[in-house]
Image (cartoon, rainbow, N blue to C red):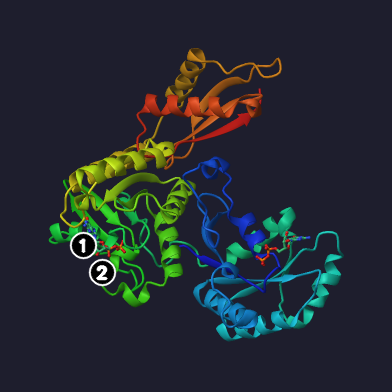
Amino acid sequence: MLPTVALVGRPNVGKSTLFNALTRSRDALVHDQPGVTRDRNYGVCRLDPERPFVVIDTGGIAGNEEGLAGATARQARAGAEEADLVLFVVDGREGPSALDDEILKWLRKAARPTLLVVNKVDGIDTQTALNEFARYGFTEVVPIAASHRSGIDELLEDVWPRLPQAGQGEELDQDPERVRVAFVGRPNVGKSTLVNRILGEERMIASDVPGTTRDSISVDLDRDGRKYRLIDTAGLRRRAKVEEAIEKFSVVKTLQAIEQCQVAVLMLDATEGVTDQDATVLGAVLDAGRGLVIAINKWDGLTTYQREQAEALLARKLSFVEWAQEVRISALHGSGLRELFRAIHRAHDSATRVLGTSEVTKALEAAYTANPPPVVRGHVPKLRFAHPGPTNPPTFIVHGTRLKTLSETYRRYLENFFRKRFKLVGTPVRFVFKEGE
Ligand code: GDP
Ligand code: GDP
């Protein structure tokens, strides 16, 4: 399971600023897309691709029906109970307040590992600010200025060793033969129906993966000669989900499932189009760089006219992920499943393909020859050579000079050229540009 860190603190101490500093994707492109939104309360922080964890901003979650103090305390408690580590965020300029004292009491009761984070130490004496909170009794206190991104690296160094190491007590990643698939989507799109339909058909060979807990169920599936592992999602928790389906809980599950899978199947409801929540899940898949298949469900319930309407809407809303395969399915009737699995393994093959250095460099030369980058202020960016980086998503490392001046249009040209050349379907593609002679 992906470790979880909760940001807890009274309003205005800088939790959402810290949340953004931790979770904002380095791949800024992803979130410049009109079809993608970010979840304001849940995100993934990646120290590097191998060290992700979920961040929850408890400040944005609950309403304040019972007044500010009550609501904050409740959020603090909920966040604390869910998390592997709590970051108790306080304001270094204002010093401790009564509300901070209140939250601290809740945190002590929750008895979760907690770090004290003193924010807004920019332009003030850090030691004085820390001393103000000495009576809280934390042995380790981390000063930061979230809005300046200062102290964040030090904070992360303190956070990571305190998290349960991913994979510990889990065997999810230990079967390299299996394609790890997660069915993700907002509530009611038909995830449980689909998973039950798939497993129902294949009941003889489906088995629960041992060692997974009540909250986390993964299932192995052999189908058409291929091996899959369906990663835990709300949909796998069969019918017991009703009371468990607290929305915030399933967001964390969704983020975790996306992180653990190689291919995410984003389920949409054809009768509802693409909602904001769908766009948020899509953003999480792109952020994580996973393979993507879009399954448009409930196709059975539409008239011909409605189908035409739905097609037009989807084409418009999903135009920026046109590399992803779309499959029209009916989980209820079990139609479209063969196409769905074909798309899944095609995405997996593309996402995990290992390419050689010479074919990648040749591709760069061909792209350059066919269409060299335009002159920028009298200089031409030079693309010298390229080699493959990590897979899932396929990554291309391009070396050259003045690469910063490469236009967005040219970057997209390169991406499309490489996609076509290597027949990469159903996976994001990343480019890393390295400056140097
Ligand atoms: P939240 O209510 O705890 O989520 O707090 P916000 O993140 O919304 O921040 C509250 C205010 O504090 C905003 O005006 C931020 O710009 C400001 N703020 C956040 N971090 C810092 C910081 O490191 N230094 C300073 N000076 N201001 C900050
Ligand atoms: P989940 O919350 O994503 O797991 O969604 P469920 O599987 O619980 O489905 C939500 C509702 O949509 C249920 O009433 C299903 O019967 C219905 N549903 C699911 N798939 C289909 C489908 O392919 N066609 C139609 N018409 N209804 C469906």
Determine whether label 2 and label 1 are within 8 Å by CB: yes
Helix, strand or loop status at disc 2: loop
Mark 1 CB within 8 Å of ligand 2: yes
Q: Position of residue 103 (x, y in %)?
A: 65, 81
How many numbered dots are placed on residues in this image?
2
* Residue at 63% from the left image edge and 62% from the top image edge: 16
Q: Position of residue 313 (x, y in %)?
A: 36, 42
Q: In the image, is 181 to the left or to the right of 103? A: left
* Residue at 45% from the left image edge and 54% from the top image edge: 276
Identify the image quadrant of the C terminus.
Answer: top right
Picture quadrant where residue 168 is located: bottom left
Picture quadrant where residue 255 is located: bottom left
What residue type is disc 1 on? Asn
385 vs 211: above or below: above
Q: Is residue 345 visible?
A: no
The quadrant of the picture showing ligand 1 is: bottom right
Q: In the image, is 21 to the left or to the right of 135? A: left
104 vs 281: above or below: below
Return the mark for residue 196: 1
